[in-house]
Image (tube, rainbow, N blue to C red):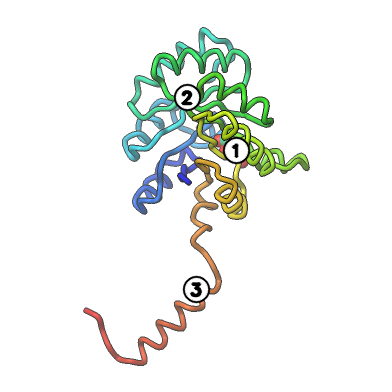
């Protein structure tokens, strides 16, 4: 499973990129607003940090303007992926951009039928939102399971990009189900490495090593 980081914070992206574990970045208008920076400047900077796919979302809701915005964003860097809302205009734009050879990420997916439509429109990625379904007492992970079955039934190549991930457990379940990508907030991504027994075991090893009085170097 690929790991994307879900943030517009370039310092966080830089830090995670240095681990070699990062496969890409996703942003959305809320994350851009939180950064307090100019959208295109942020996308350009992120594309300079990572060679992986970087999702940049259109702000328009009509087909013609979405296409114009997509062209503008696509010109920022080769690894920009155009993020489009799951509406009929968004799907129409997805179809056209896919035919032009532009990568797309269809976002705000909350049902298996929406994911089916995005795959038929040729989306590179579909973004089902796990956490926001959980928030309204629905089962976000069940949606990932359903999409996996449907895409495998028909051989769709659209990658399942599990989004709105809130916990390490979401990441684990997505990997078990077979999501292609998980886009994870920086804090949750960093939390994946933590285990109390790892810390405890390392402390014990270091204590015993000190007792030997040896040095490797
Ligand atoms: O970028 C889309 C998605 O990951 C947003 O997550 O936590 O705002 O529901 P969240």
In the displayed structure image, the side of residue 146 where residue 123 appears, left or right: left
Q: Position of residue 184 (x, y in %)?
A: 53, 45
Whole-Å distance between the Cαs marked 3 and 1? 35 Å
Q: Marks 3 and 2: in contact by CB < 8 Å?
A: no
Q: Nearer the viewer, residue 160 or 51?
A: 160
Q: Position of residue 165 (x, y in %)?
A: 60, 45
Q: Position of residue 150 (x, y in %)?
A: 62, 32
Q: Position of residue 151 (x, y in %)?
A: 58, 32
Q: Nearer the viewer, mark 2 or mark 3?
A: 2
Q: Nearer the viewer, mark 3 or mark 1?
A: 1
Name which residue lies at 57% across and 35% down. 152
Name which residue lies at 39% across and 19% down. 101
Q: Which residue lies under the disc numbered 2?
A: 104
Q: Which residue lies under the disc numbered 3?
A: 199
* Mark 2 Cα shell of 10 Å, populated few (<14), some (14-19), many (≥20): many
Q: Marks 2 and 1: in contact by CB < 8 Å?
A: no
The answer to which quarter of the image holds residue 46 is: top left
Q: Is residue 14 above or below residue 214?
A: above
Q: Which residue lies under the disc numbered 1?
A: 148
SS for dot 1:
helix
Q: Is residue 39 above or below residue 168?
A: above
């Amino acid at each position: 499973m690929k790991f994307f980081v879900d943030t517009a914070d370039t310092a966080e992206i830089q830090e995670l990129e240095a681990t070699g574990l990062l496969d890409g970045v996703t942003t959305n208008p809320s994350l851009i607003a939180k950064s307090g920076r100019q959208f295109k400047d942020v996308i350009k900077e992120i594309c300079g940090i990572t060679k992986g796919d970087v999702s940049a979302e259109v702000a328009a809701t009509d087909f013609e303007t979405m296409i114009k915005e997509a062209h503008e964003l696509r010109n920022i860097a080769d690894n920009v992926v155009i993020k489009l809302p799951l509406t009929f205009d968004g799907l129409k734009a997805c179809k056209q951009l896919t035919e032009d050879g532009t990568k797309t990420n269809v976002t705000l997916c909350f049902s298996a039928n929406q994911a089916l439509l995005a795959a038929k429109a040729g989306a590179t990625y579909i973004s089902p939102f796990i956490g926001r379904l959980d928030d309204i007492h629905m089962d976000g992970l069940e949606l990932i399971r359903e999409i996996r079955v449907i895409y495998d039934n028909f051989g769709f190549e659209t990658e399942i990009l599990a989004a709105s991930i809130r916990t390490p457990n979401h990441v684990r379940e997505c990997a078990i189900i077979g999501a292609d990508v998980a886009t994870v907030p920086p804090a949750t991504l960093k939390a994946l490495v933590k285990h109390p027994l790892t810390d405890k075991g390392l402390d014990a090893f270091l204590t015993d090593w000190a007792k030997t009085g040896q040095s490797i170097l």
